[in-house]
Image (tube, rainbow, N blue to C red):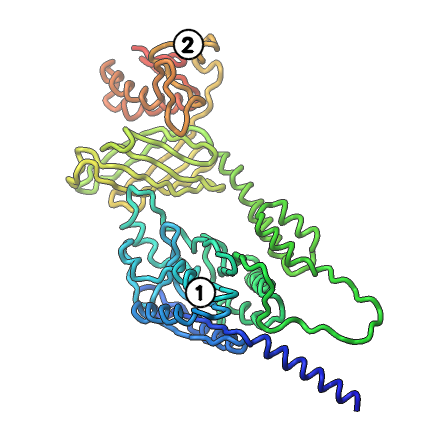
Amino acid sequence: MRLLQFLAFCFLLLALSALDAHADKRVALVIGNGAYRNVPALTNPTNDAADVGAALKRAGFEPLVATDLDQAAMQDTVLRFAREARGADVALFYYSGHALQFAGVNYLVPVDAVVRDEVDLRRLVRADEILADLQQAKNLRILVLDACRDNPFADELRRNVGQGRGVTVARGLAKMESPDGTIISYATQAGRTADDGDGRNSPYTSAFLEHIRDRDNINTVFQTISAGVYQRTNGSQVPELSLSFFGEYYLNGKPETAALAPSAPPQSDPCADAGDHWRSAEALGTLAAFKDHLVRFPACAFADLAKSRIAALTKSADDVKRSAAFDGTWIGKETCESKPPFPEGYYQYALRIKDGVLHAVFGDEGKPGSSVYDGRIEADGSASITVNGLFGENDPLRRPAGSPYQYKIVLALKEASGAGVRTETARPCRMELSKLAPQGPNANPAQTDPKRATKRDDKTAVVSPEQREGGKARQTGGGLSCSAMRSRCAVACVSLGGRADCASTACPRLEAECMSSGCWYGRGFSGCGLARR
């Protein structure tokens, strides 16, 4: 009889626990957009939305599930959810489909979207506005973005937006700051893309469905989901998690604890503190923090994620070292084919790479006829160099002087040579590059006195690279920058009876030597730090 009473008491406690777990008001909006009309369709988002909606309903939510929404329907659905979030204890937004970032803002894409420039972005739904709607919930707000597929509008945006304004169209999504009481979960790290998946669901949604019913604190649930995605993709996709919820919340009730008579002392759980320690390591984001976590909890839930973070940070440091191997001064020889109205052209110029970054300014920056080259050299020697400039007076297409233009040069460097080609432009041009060998102390007989290299009292002295600040020459004692010396060379070499093309061949090499050592070694311009006829 007593056994029956005890069992009845246990069942009553379980029932009360279940009621308490779902006593609060939980609302959710789940959107899956896959049937895109103007860009490649996605297979899984509608399945993701249906399955996530069903899982949330079992977890005590009142989910609103919507799929394949056009612009009008998506706006209406988001507004409806904003009203539902008022007064709710928990509000959750889950999106699966195409999304993009522009100028650091994330946009969710309706199925009928056409995005040609920044004006069309107003037709999309901003993720930061969804985040603001979630803040109306009392206790807990959750934003889930399984939406980091490749930006299908990137090429069109790059062609039509940001010329001369430094606006970039990046991959993946931008990281958003999470307000207090908020969890933001991304399918992959900021600036990277995620997989749509080969099965019924995406890798992220598969992990979400597996763990959203776990009887753990909500922070631990989402950390476990992230670890699950990493394991499912064999480390190729690493979710990013922004946690600003510091209390305790259990979607499915707390884990059951046995109330039996004490026997042997319970074994301590080696992973009991892994979750808290991982949150601290994520907040620090340093290589030492992740290594410390791996040492303390080598067999716990976040060990694989710690290995991934360590590998990524180590790779980044190694990449910086390897890309710096291309540092120095390079001569670029560019040949452009005749393609009316553009004539055939041949150009030669000096380019400087420092700390793995190529930056060069030609002409007076910001004035007609000027151009600026910028780009990072990857560890393997590849690079995409952006060229921003302003048209001069003699544009073949008769565009007004001062009008902005932009194109890219795709480079491939290897040791002391390389090649490149212009892209995103109508003019076909190819480039050959060669690295200038460092000048030895005895490279020029005219430089016999080492002290002369540092002399700065001559009114035409060249300012050495070490005295440059921010890519511009700092004028000291009447010194001239290497680019200014090149301009003087272009005038002088013709007046001295040199070849007709010496301004575009000999002068760039002299400029490169100046950039490398602060000295000129050429007829009419010889001697370290001096310019003379």
Q: Is residue 453 left or right of residue 488?
A: right
Q: Is residue 148 above or below residue 311?
A: below
Residue 357: percent from left, percent from top: 43, 36
Helix or strand or loop: what does disc 2 sit on?
loop
In the depicted view, which residue is nearer to us: 198 or 412? Answer: 198
Task: Specify the amino acid type for callout 2.
Answer: Ala
At 43% across and 69% down in the image, what residue appears?
86
> Is disc 1 surrounded by few (<14), some (14 to 19) or many (20+) residues within 10 Å?
many
Q: Amino acid at mark 1?
A: Gln
* Residue 213 occupies quadrant: bottom right
Whether 483 is drawn above or below 71: the answer is: above
* 356 in relation to 120, above or below: above
Q: Residue drawn 47% across and 75% down? A: 53
Toward the top, the furthest residue is 449
Number of marks in the image?
Answer: 2
Which mark identifies residue 436?
none
Q: In this orientation, which residue lies closer to the viewer: 183 or 339?
A: 183
Whether residue 109 appears in this view of the structure is yes
Given the current orientation, which residue lies at the most extreme right position?
264
**Residue 533 image point, x, y percent:** 29, 10
Q: Which residue is mark 2?
A: 446
Residue behind mark 1: 136
Quadrant that contains the N terminus:
bottom right
Residue 215: x, y in percent? 62, 71
Q: Residues within 10 Å of mark 2 (few under 14, many from 20)?
A: few
Q: Nearer the viewer, mark 2 or mark 1?
A: 1
Q: Residue at x 50, y 55 (%)?
A: 189
Q: Are marks 2 and 1 in contact (CB under 8 Å)?
A: no
Q: Is residue 190 above or below residue 360?
A: below
Can the viewer see residue 237? Answer: no
- Helix, strand or loop at label 1? It is loop
Lower sequence index among marks 2 and 1? 1
